[in-house]
Image (spheres, helix red, strand yellow):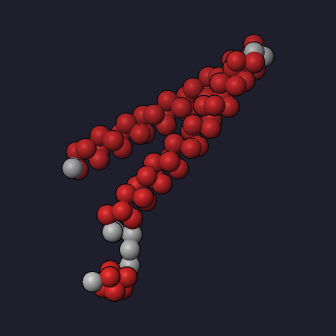
C-alpha cells in the first residue's frame, strides 16, 4: 500500500508541475499572440492547478469519514 501511495503522490506532483508549466506557457503565448484560445487555455490551466489539490484532499477526507477514521473516539463508543 505504501508503494501505491508513493506512486500516486508522484503522479499528482507530476500533474501539478505540468499544470504550472502549461499555465506559464499559455500566459506567454497569450501575451505574444493575443489569441482568444490562449486566454481561455491559461485560465483553464490555472483553474485546474488550483482545484486538483482541493479535489484530492476532499476525496481523502470523505474516504477517511467513510472508513471511520474521521470520527472521534467518544462517538465510536456511543455507537456500540
Instruction: Looking at the picture, tell me which residue is in the foreground, 42 or 79.
Output: 79
Instruction: Looking at the picture, tell me which residue is in the foreground, 20 or 4.
Output: 4
Q: Residue 56 in the image: state x and y as whole percent.
A: 45, 48
Is residue 56 at least partly visible in the picture?
A: yes
Q: Residue 3 in the image: state x and y as whole percent.
A: 22, 45
- Does residue 49 appear to the left or right of 37 in the view shown? left
Q: Is residue 62 above or below residue 6?
A: below
Residue 73 found in image quarter: bottom left
Q: Residue 43 in the image: state x and y as whole percent.
A: 68, 31
Question: Which residue is farthest top?
Answer: 33
Residue for point 29% across, 47% down: 5
- Does residue 76 appear to the left or right of 19 in the view shown? left
> Which quadrant would the C terminus be assigned to in this image?
bottom left
Question: Which residue is farthest front?
Answer: 80
Residue for point 56% across, 38% down: 49
Residue 22 found in image quarter: top right
Residue 23 found in image quarter: top right
Residue for point 75% across, 15% down: 35
Residue for point 72% across, 24% down: 39
Is residue 27 at least partly visible in the picture?
A: no
Q: Is residue 22 above or below residue 49?
A: above
Number of marks in picture: 0
Amino acid at each position: 500500500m505504501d508503494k501505491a501511495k508513493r506512486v500516486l503522490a508522484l503522479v499528482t506532483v507530476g500533474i501539478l508541475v505540468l499544470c504550472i508549466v502549461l499555465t506559464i506557457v499559455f500566459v506567454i503565448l497569450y501575451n505574444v499572440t493575443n489569441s482568444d484560445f490562449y486566454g481561455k487555455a491559461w485560465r483553464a490551466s490555472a483553474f485546474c492547478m488550483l482545484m486538483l489539490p482541493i479535489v484530492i484532499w476532499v476525496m481523502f477526507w470523505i474516504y477517511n469519514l467513510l472508513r471511520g477514521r474521521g470520527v472521534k473516539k467518544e462517538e465510536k463508543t456511543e455507537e456500540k
